[in-house]
Amino acid sequence: MVQVAAALLFTLAAGLGVTVILAMIKHNENAILSALLGEGAFPVDSAPHSDPAPQKMTLRRSSARRDAPRPMRAATRMQPAFSRAA
């Protein structure tokens, strides 16, 4: 009896999953098909295009940042996680 109830519950869940997938395909058919065909969200002719940058701008380095001291690691001996008495 429990196996029959589990099988019916599994069938109901699978049917609900298929229904959700079919509803998504019905509402987003064009987007899904264009994604499967490799066109992406925006077809080439309607894709947003950015304008080229008007001029190239170089950044200067800050000497204070370059000369910042580096943290040194302390030379410590690693202690074992367990004590020797244990």
Image (cartoon, helix red, strand yellow):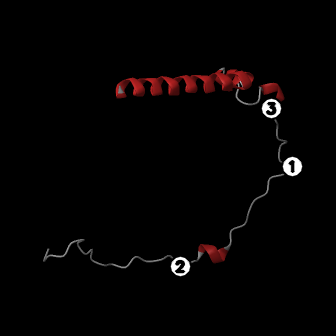
Q: Is residue 43 visible in the rendered structure shown here?
A: yes
Q: Which residue is mark 3?
A: 47
Label 1: how many Cα within 10 Å (few below 14, some 14–19, many 20+): few
- Marks 2/3: CA distance? 48 Å
Identify whether 2 is placed above or below 80.
above
What residue is at 78 percent from the left and 26 percent from the top?
44
Is residue 38 visible to us here? no
Q: Tell me how far mark 2 sits from mark 1, CA to CA.
A: 38 Å
Q: Earlier in the sequence, mark 2 or mark 1?
A: 1
Residue linked to disc 2? 69
- What residue would you read off at disc 1? 54
Q: Is residue 86 left or right of residue 37?
A: left
Q: Position of residue 11 (x, y in %)?
A: 48, 22
Indicate the secondary structure of the residue bearing disc 3.
loop
Disc 2 or 3, which lies upstream in sequence? Answer: 3
**Tag 2: residue type?**
Pro
Secondary structure under tag 2 reads: loop
Q: Residue at x 82, y 25 (%)?
A: 45
Q: Quadrant of the N terminus?
A: top left
